[in-house]
Amino acid sequence: MPQIRSALARLSLSAILFILLDLMIPSCAPTLKQMPVSESAARSEAEKQREMALEVWVKKQDRLGAVSYRLTRASAELCGEQRAIYGFVAHDVGSYSKDYREAAIKYFGLGDCPVVRNVQPNFPAALAGLQPGDSLKAINGKSVEGKTTLQAMEMLLKASSSTDSLKLDVRRKGQILNLSMLGVPACDYPVLATEDDVVNAYADGEKVFIASGMLRFTEDDDELAFVVGHELSHDALGHIGKKKGNSLLGAILDVAVAATTGVNTGGMFSNAAANAFSQRFEAEADYEGLYMAARAGFDITKAPNFWRRMAAEHPGSIKKNFTASHPSTPERFIAMENAVTEIQSKRNRGIALVPEKASERGPSTSRPTSTIPTRPDSAEQSNAGSSRVPSDTLTTARATRDSTKQHGDAPFKVILGDGSVIPARSVRPWGVGQVKVTSPMGQSQYIDSSSIRSILDQDGHDWTEDVVDRGKRLPRE
């Protein structure tokens, strides 16, 4: 009986509280009119939002693809693993998550067959005439009917591993077209976007992953190139495999200590070994990543300010952390400035943009920045480090004359906005807003056309408009 009375008392108290709550809630309720929303209108609005989200996501992927194609193409010789690329992306309904498939069908008119979504200008696919919306029917004579885009791309990868030549049969407006193209070498490290809304990017030794949050954080393609180049360098330099190897050696010590002393180290040696060279690996990736960006024609002078902005949004990285896997932001900023100076100096002297080995740069110290020269000679610093633009024709002619003395007989001179001069054997348009400049020694670099002041031949004739605006090549063919 006492239990029953206690239960009834609790029930009565709950009922009283519920009644009081029911009486009090209306006094805190909204007082304005609520607009009616039909169920069909809500479904329609949700569909619109999914279409908008899909459009934004595809634009992010295409932006990343455009930057990545330039980087992997220009840095092929810096990567141990290479493959032929053609410069197009295909997709089908299965390329998207279930939430977005209806939107993909409506937005792109997709079905189950692979359809070309994006074609990079001035890459083999575009030059062969491939267009967005073309349906893939066969790859090198093998039908892709009934195959997904993923299966079709696997066929393409197998084809490109044995030969650079590619033949595509595509359907366009009811007609079958036969297109042939020759691939160009590029780093064999695919760059992929992830939907994670965090400011992050990473490499796994085989691929590069750029989070959606990082795509939003980078304000322009130059900044995005710094990030992608950094992660590509991790793959190209084999950092992931080296860290795993170091971790394995540490794990052996963990086992040995446990076996001889009975003490469980909790993976202490494994973790310490894995991080033994982490800061040096990050410094190397920064250094080579800038070279990759410069070779692809991105404006590397923006790199230091990019890391400044990272520091402003993530101030914790300013503090020196001995066990941190990334160099602290101040060190990274200084190293970036030194690397930019080094690269500009090489451009001035017509030297190939290839990262230097540690032995070529002198003895190293414990600081990550020691792998990068901290001070060029005075002549280089006065030229490459200056931001002053030549203000008259005499200044430009003098720069060209001085460069000719230094570099010997080069038929063309490309003069940049900062006054630096690049001797060139040939100059030609490349990609969107880029110019490919090949040195007398045969090394090529890719430069944004907006950073070019003038392109002169040995007689002083200015070919800038012909190359940049009219798409002509030098020497003329």
Image (cartoon, rainbow, N blue to C red):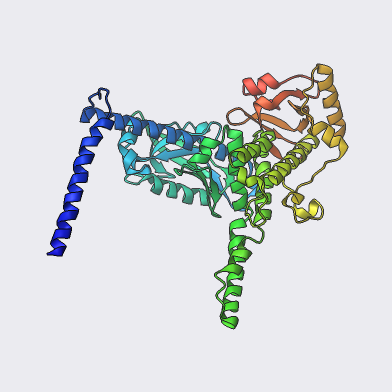
From the viewer's side, name the closer residue of 184 and 53.
53
Query: x%, y% of residue 438?
Result: 71, 35
From the viewer's side, name the closer residue of 295 and 11.
11
Which residue corresponds to the image point at 43% horizontal and 50% vertical from the top-left? Answer: 154
Query: x%, y% of residue 13?
Result: 20, 50
Give the side of residue 112 with respect to residue 188, left or right.
left
Which residue corresponds to the image point at 63% horizontal and 46% vertical from the top-left? Answer: 317
Which quadrant would residue 429 be assigned to in this image?
A: top right
Give the side of residue 152 with respect to residue 22, left or right.
right
The number of discs equals: 0
Which quadrant would residue 114 be assigned to in this image?
A: top left
Q: Is residue 133 visible?
A: no
Residue 468, compared with residue 336, is above or below; it is above
Which residue corresponds to the image point at 55% horizontal and 45% vertical from the top-left? Answer: 84
From the viewer's side, name the closer residue of 411 and 337.
337
Query: x%, y% of residue 19?
Result: 18, 41
Residue 375, compared with residue 384, is above or below; it is below
Give the side of residue 198 with respect to residue 149, left or right.
right
Which quadrant would residue 460 be assigned to in this image?
A: top right
